[in-house]
Image: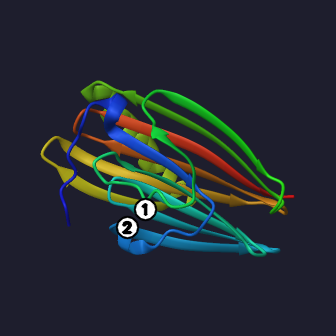
Amino acid sequence: MNPIVTPQLDQAFAFGLYNRALHPEFFELRNRKVVRHEGWELESWIVNGGHALRFGTGSACYSEVICWNESPLPSANAVTTFLCGGEHDLDERFEQDGVGYIATIQSETLGENLYRATFDEMLDYAAEAEAQVSRWATPAGQSMSIIDVQRFHKEVHAQCYHLFAPGGIVLRTQTIFEQK
């Protein structure tokens, strides 16, 4: 397993939204889950330093990826890509496929005590929600990624949390894929 290096927060994470499936060879998978419901499917991966979500309905397929910026994202079929330090909101409508996509991304740097308290709180949340979890130790302390998925009739919500002890970085995303 490749070690995770912590760059500056404003350069730490790269975001990509694609109108295609991404292949697992781009990532080091730590955890995988598939949720199917009434005409749509969401596959969620916790990857080394981030996550990937693949939403499919009919012949449409869209993927969201957040990973360490040092891991180059593919460029083919990218709807949008950017570095995701700070806060970002996205609202995309893919009328040709009957798919809506909404996402909010927030990142922050916490001091050591606040980071540990947040880590413990998120660990409890993940257990209660029966969410996907991947934990690993670093010289700076425990790090963790969580994906919590809620399915609804015509949409799926995914809350993803990435806590990195080196630097006290916390990245939160909330994503909604809608079937129109």
Residue corresponding to mark 1: 46
Q: Is residue 132 left or right of residue 29?
A: right
Residue under the point 46% across and 27% down: 86
Q: Could you say which is closer to the camera, residue 52 or residue 74?
A: 74
Q: Position of residue 45 (x, y in %)?
A: 47, 65
Q: Quick one: label 1 or label 2, which is nearer the N terminus?
A: 2
Residue 58 appears in the figure: yes
Residue 26 numbered mark, or none = 2
Q: How is the image coloured?
A: rainbow
Q: What is the quadrant of residue 7 in the picture?
A: top left
Query: For the residues marked 1 and 2, what is the alpha-carbon distance in whole angstroms?
Result: 13 Å
How many badges with numbers are in the image? 2
Look at 42% across and 69% down and name the residue there: 31
Query: Is 39 situated left or right of 64 in this image?
Result: right
Q: Position of residue 23 (x, y in %)?
A: 46, 73
Point 25% across, 48% down: residue: 142
- Amino acid bearing label 1: Ile
> Which quadrant does the N terminus fall into?
bottom left
Picture quadrant where residue 171 is located: top left
Residue 34, percent across and down? 59, 74
Give the vertical position of 96 relative to 39 (above or below). above
Q: Quadrant of the C terminus?
A: bottom right
- Note whether 69 is above or below 21 in the view shown: above
In the orientation shown, which residue stands out farthest toward the left? 139
- Label drawn at residue 62: none
Q: Residues within 10 Å of mark 1 (few under 14, many from 20)?
A: many
Say which amino acid is labelled 2: Phe
Q: Is mark 2 on a helix, strand or loop?
A: helix
